[in-house]
Image (cartoon, rainbow, N blue to C red):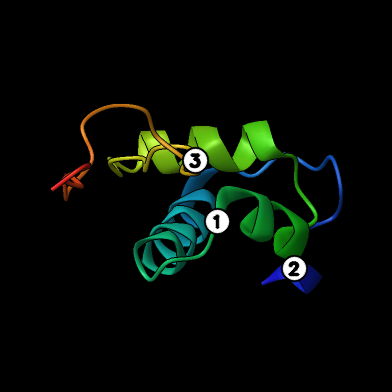
Amino acid sequence: MAETLKKGSRVTGAAREKLAAELKKKYDSGASIRALAEETGRSYGFVHRMLSESGVTLRGRGGATRGKAKTAAVVGS
């Protein structure tokens, strides 16, 4: 995929649709936007835009989340 794209070149038409489909498939398989950007030689913003245009539901940022714990520890029993 990366060898067909020159950095900064405009991606239009069928090539854009093909790239969007490939990015969508890899993202849905668990690849991160940053990993896809590095693989294709494009920016994070470009990959994010392509995924959004192709209708992907973007994942959250991950990491520790605040809120109710799944299991509550009983203290002092």
Q: In the rendered image of this protein, does residue 11 appear above or below residue 24?
A: above
Which-is-in-front pick, marks 2 and 1? 1
Label 3, label 2: how far apart the Cα atoms are: 15 Å
Pick whichever of labels 2 and 1 is earlier in the sequence. Answer: 2
Q: In the rendered image of this protein, does residue 67 appear above or below residue 60?
A: above
Q: Which residue is mark 2?
A: 2
Identify the mark at residue 50; answer none if there is no mark.
3
User: For the point 27% across and 40% down, which residue is it?
Assistant: 55
| Quadrant into which the N terminus falls | bottom right
Task: Specify the amino acid type for callout 3.
Answer: Met
Label 1 crowding class (10 Å Cα cut-off): few <14, some 14-19, many 20+? some
Task: Specify the amino acid type for callout 2.
Answer: Ala
Q: Nearer the viewer, residue 12 or 34?
A: 34
Which-is-in-front pick, marks 1 and 3? 1
Give the secondary structure at mark 3: helix
Q: In the shown orientation, is residue 66 left or right of residue 20?
A: left
Identify the mark at residue 17; answer none if there is no mark.
none
Q: In the rendered image of this protein, does residue 28 appear above or below residue 53?
A: below
Pick whichever of labels 3 and 2 is earlier in the sequence. Answer: 2
Label 1, label 3: how far apart the Cα atoms are: 13 Å
